[in-house]
Image: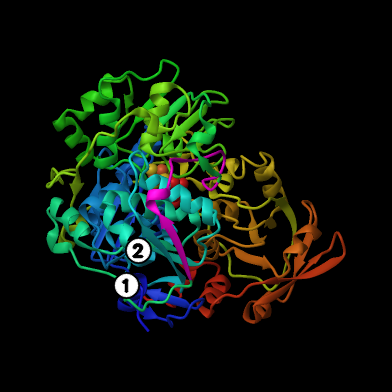
Amino acid sequence: MGLTIAQKIIKEHLLSGEMTVGSEIGLKIDQTLTQDATGTMAYLEFEAMGVDRVRTERSVAYIDHNTLQSGFENADDHRYIQSVAKKHGIYFSRPGNGICHQVHLERFGKPGKTLIGSDSHTPTGGGIGMLAFGAGGLDVAVAMGGGAYYITMPKMFKVELTGKLKPFVTAKDVSLEILRILSVKGGVGAIIEWGGEGVKTLSVPERATITNMGTELGATTSIFPADEITRAFLKAEGREADYRQLESDADAVYDRIIPIDLSALKPMIACPHSPDNVVAVESLAGTRVDQVCIGSCTNSSLQDMLKVAALLKGKTISPDVSVSVSPGSKQVLTMLSECGALTDILASGARVLECACGPCIGMGFSPNSAGVSLRTFNRNFEGRSGTADAKVYLVSPETAVAAALTGAVTDPRLLGDMPSVALPEAFRLDDSAVLAPVAAEDAAGVEILRGPNIKPFPRSKPMENGITASLTLKVGDNITTDHIMPAGAKILPYRSNIPYLSQFCFGVCDKSFPERARTAGVNIIVGGSNYGQGSSREHAALVPLYLGVRIVLAKSFARIHAANLINAGILPLTFADPADYDRVNQGDVLAVTDMMQGLEQGRMTVTNTTAGVSFTAVCSFTLRQQAILKAGGLLPYTALGSQEV
Ligand code: MIC
Ligand code: SF4
């Protein structure tokens, strides 16, 4: 039987397990990346592991999220990360050099290699045929130390592309269309491979937009073949030698095939507050818009920015709309400036922001009260923009420009002719903002610079055999990590200060939760399906741990968050019968007994002592996961020598 592209890369990197769907596999990781919002914690964990130098082929620390320095905190954390990187063999991408996924694609990604990153959009690398996963910081720390990365062997989905995109219809619309078809849960447990004749019509940046947003499907990752288009991109980046052809075998077997005819697509828009709440742009035409934001790791490539500049050229934005443009990298911004496109953007009245995540993570540029914001980003979760009652819509750069010019949601096909935009044969290469680490023999002399904002992170205790605790919070389906541990300019600077962060935990759902959890001591959270979707931030596990949460009982979990809970030593239990969700209420006292035996048997009995009912919860974990939970998390498990790092 033939293999898919992902199966080929997995086979080449398999350290443990069988490649049968649903079983745990351990993968050798070639490259890692971190960003600063998750990186501080990841490097504290890396230091706690006591490994001197990274054992990967390439590890890069990016500063792109926490770039607003309204106090000493972010600047201190950047300095800390820079010093750790220098000492331990990690390349350091300075603030201003760009968004991690964009820069990694340009300068470091290689077809056929494995990459994990402490950011959920790491699958962007699938655009050049990398097998790239988002992961919690601790998993990245272990991989930097040479340890395996464990995932459940996924199913294989194939999106079979035919046709060619019409003018003003873009890769972003392809992403929104697949979200409309599959929903934010539709990719769970699967790798999505993009194939078919239509692939040849898509450039690498377009492919990267699509693999980037595969994260919103809940997919384990997404990947494109590496072909002559990939080779041309790498050549233009001065890295043709990194090219390797990759395609699936003709007789590769897929669990599901989803056909999409590119020529039949229209401009699409995701409505508040979920990326799968997708309709055609034309159906919302005329909706007034207050703000337009162009950029983020989804749509900030040179190709995107050149199109934006060409559409804005000679025009002025609507007086009622505030517009931001954030190019994805220094390379993109420099080239925009050199060809004059930057002048066209500035002349239109748009505000050009630095090359960073910026508004996407609420790091500035929050909309006005109840404002309508059209963004070329990948997430529109409630409150994420920093304005609690804002209504955020997700669109392509073309649709964003149409709204910026008219002041209302407008089908971009009404803008006239689409100017043709070609990718350059050679990008402008300047890696001066990437600092190399010192040689191993000089590492001892490098001092780690720690600011006062760095506080010890919480550690769980070894698992006990029974827990009786109150249910301090019951939430519904599709709870995101932005609900559990919100981000934004005011909170993000405290990513290395869990005690401070804890006061904001679940703030979007219930501001009284932190106090209630603290008072309860040991406590339990109940969630619906797809609990913990979205970001890879392990803070969504570490903060609840700090607040005494020992069990999260849900209908189902998102992949990265479930791993983060286990790594933190919190037990993720699943209702055997989802109807039992209705048999527990906030404030009830739940008792779980015989947990050690239950862990081995894969089932535990939960008794709701308040209501006087019992039901079964599932905990089908591998032996490795059981051992991690028993030890009280991945760090103590690693210290026990169970995992070689
Ligand atoms: C996001 O887009 O939500 C983030 C911010 O990039 C996160 C990482 C984080 O929370 O720091 C992600 O996607 O993993
Ligand atoms: Fe940054 Fe937004 Fe991309 Fe997350 S989704 S990495 S915040 S640009």
Give, as a three-letter code, the residue at label 1: Ser
483 inside magenta stretch? no
Q: Nearer the viewer, residue 543 or 605?
A: 605
Residue 606 lies in what quarter of the image?
bottom right
**Label 2 Cα crowd, 10 Å radius (few <14 / some 14-19 / many 20+):** some
**Quadrant of image for the C terminus:** bottom left
Verify CB contact (< 8 Å) between mark 1 and mark 2.
Answer: yes
The disc at residue 589 is: none
> Which badge, 1 or 2, is on the more N-terminal residue?
2
**Quadrant of image for the N terminus:** bottom left
Q: Position of residue 214 (x, y in %)?
A: 43, 55
Q: Which portion, as a residue range, is magenta?
A: 256-276
Q: What element carries label 2?
A: strand
Left/right placement of residue 567 relative to residue 57 reads right
Q: Nearer the viewer, residue 462 or 320?
A: 320
**Label 1 Cα crowd, 10 Å radius (few <14 / some 14-19 / many 20+):** some
Which residue is depicted at the point 58% across and 32% down? Answer: 388
